[in-house]
């Protein structure tokens, strides 16, 4: 067994995001889900696979962030990536920034007009704020990847959990999980 299995384990959604990012630049990738489900870890694992050229910035810090902060991060990602097709930027907890969707729309559209290949991944955990910003300003410009809570199968594979260790699972789901454990 691995000493730190979380480092080696990648959630199934990682393969989908990797596939999308390997395509030519077309959509902003939005990874959304509840807090503490591994959104940041998933994207950081993929960024390590890609190597240099991916800028990560988090709005989850206590200092005040605004649309100008997004523009600064975007410009830094452009400079770091140059004209390389693999250049990318990750904005984590983007919903915490006032006016985030308008700023992202403006910068994304500017890069599209100028044929800049910068690929963008947005992470967010407040479903209502993320949904409002995506539908109001970013309609037609994004693909959504939902990252739900960990399933029993994932917890078993990543950490070796059994049914007794799987947290807060109702008895009916434990019965279903036992069935899938026995048949897989």
Image: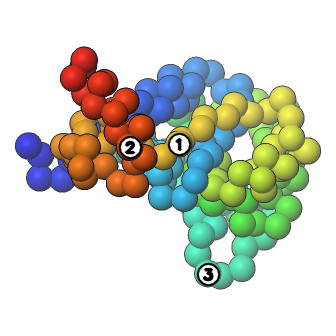
Mark carried by residue 171: 2
**Label drawn at residue 182:** none
Q: Which comes before the other along the chain, label 3 or label 1?
A: 3
What is the secondary structure assignment of the residue under circle 3? loop
Q: Are marks 3 and 1 in contact (CB under 8 Å)?
A: no
Residue drawn at 58 percent across, 53 percent down: 34
Q: Quadrant of residue 175?
A: top left
Residue mark closest to the camera, 3 vs 1: 1
- Outermost residue to the bottom: 63
Residue in front for this viewpoint, 150 or 163: 163
Q: Which mark is residue 62?
A: 3
Whichever of labels 2 and 3 marks the residue nearer the N terminus, that label is 3
Closer to the eye: label 2 or 3: 2
Of the numbered discs 1 and 2, the one sitting upstream in the chain is 1
- Around disc 1, counting alpha carbons within 10 Å, would you say few (fewer than 14), some (14 to 19), or many (20 or more)? some
Q: Quadrant of residue 124?
A: bottom right
Residue 102: x and y, percent? 87, 53
Q: Assess whether mark 2 and mark 1 are in contact (beta carbons under 8 angstroms).
A: no
List x then y, in percent, for residue 55.
Answer: 53, 53
**Residue 177 appears in the picture as rendered:** yes
In the image: residue 36, left or right of residue 180: right
Q: Is residue 50 visible?
A: no
Mark 3 Cα shell of 10 Å, populated few (<14), some (14-19), many (≥20): few
Q: Nearer the viewer, mark 1 or mark 2?
A: 2
Label for residue 148?
A: 1
Q: Residue furthest top?
A: 183
Secondary structure under badge 2?
helix
- Which residue is located at x 52 percent, y 31 percent? 17
* Depth check, front residue: 168 or 29: 168
Residue ID at (62%, 21%): 24
Instruction: Name the quarter where the C terminus is drawn.
Output: top left
Per the model, the C-alpha gap separating discs 2 and 3 is 40 Å
């Amino acid at each position: 067994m691995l000493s730190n299995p979380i480092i080696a384990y990648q959630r199934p959604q990682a393969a989908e995001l990797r596939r999308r990012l390997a395509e030519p630049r077309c959509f902003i990738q939005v990874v959304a889900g509840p807090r503490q489900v591994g959104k940041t870890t998933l994207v950081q694992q993929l960024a390590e696979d890609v190597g240099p050229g991916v800028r990560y910035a988090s709005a989850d810090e206590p200092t005040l962030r605004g649309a100008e902060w997004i523009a600064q991060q975007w410009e830094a990602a452009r400079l770091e990536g140059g004209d390389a097709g693999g250049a990318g930027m990750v904005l984590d907890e983007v919903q915490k920034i006032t006016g985030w969707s308008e700023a992202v729309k403006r910068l994304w559209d500017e890069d599209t007009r100028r044929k800049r290949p910068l690929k963008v991944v947005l992470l967010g955990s407040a479903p209502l704020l993320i949904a409002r910003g995506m539908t109001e300003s970013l309609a037609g410009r994004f693909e959504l990847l939902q990252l739900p809570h960990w399933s029993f199968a994932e917890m078993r594979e990543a950490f070796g959990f059994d049914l007794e260790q799987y947290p807060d699972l109702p008895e009916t789901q434990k019965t279903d999980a036992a069935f899938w454990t026995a048949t897989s």
